[in-house]
Image (cartoon, grey):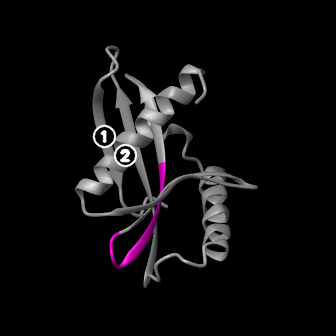
Amino acid sequence: MSTDPRHRLGRIGERLAGEHLQRLGYEILTRNHRTRFGELDLIAFDGVRIVFCEVKTRRAPGDPFESLHPAKQRQVRKMAALWLIEAPNRPRASELRFDAIGITIDATGRLSRLEHLEGAF
């Protein structure tokens, strides 16, 4: 694991986001799936839909969603399309959705806010 504080912060946020999705009844299909276009943070399944979840983590008072711009959204869609092609054993789903989970960590390193935007893009 990287010793870069930004990477550690990102991994903490991804862990918290995964736990959140599991509490909602989602099965986490994969974490940190690498493609030639980048990395998909979380891919989850709720029995009906596959959800590609982009996780953004910031220290307070930052806005986790400030970097979820149209270019990033296009990148995530490309990575998702590639995963769908390359994952033959994935569950079949009638829907696909792109969510974003924003995690804010306070100065003491504790979760300050978790915001889940279903169908964010």
Farthest-out residue, top: 108
Give residue 111's position: percent from left, percent from top. 29, 29
User: Which residue sits at x=47%, y=28%?
Assistant: 9
Is residue 92 or residue 68 the one in the foreground? 92
User: Which residue sits at x=67%, y=64%?
Assistant: 78
Is residue 3 or residue 72 the one in the foreground? 3
Amino acid carrying label 1: it is Leu
User: Which residue sits at x=30%, y=40%?
Assistant: 114
Give residue 27's position: percent from left, percent from top. 35, 64
Is residue 78 or residue 33 the one in the foreground? 33
How crowded pointer 1 is (Cα within 10 Å; few <14, some 14-19, many 20+) is rated as: some
Tag 1's secondary structure? strand
Residue identified by numbered label 2 = 17
Label for residue 114? Answer: 1
Q: How many marks?
A: 2
Does the magenta-highlighted stretch encompass residue 50? yes
Label for residue 30? Answer: none
Q: Are marks 2 and 1 in contact (CB under 8 Å)?
A: yes
Amino acid carrying label 2: it is Ala
Q: CA distance from mark 2 to mark 1?
A: 8 Å
Give residue 94's position: percent from left, percent from top. 43, 85
Name the mark nearer the viewer: 2 or 1. Answer: 2
User: Does 28 sit left or right of 75 as displayed?
Assistant: left
Tag 2's secondary structure? helix
Question: The magenta stretch spans which residues?
Answer: 46-54
The quarter holding residue 97 reads bottom left
The quarter holding residue 24 reads bottom left
User: Does 67 sit left or right of 104 as displayed?
Assistant: right
Give residue 117's position: percent from left, percent from top. 36, 54
Most frequent secondary structure within the magenta stretch = strand
User: Does 107 sit left or right of 81 as displayed?
Assistant: left
Q: Identify whether 94 is placed above or below 62.
A: below
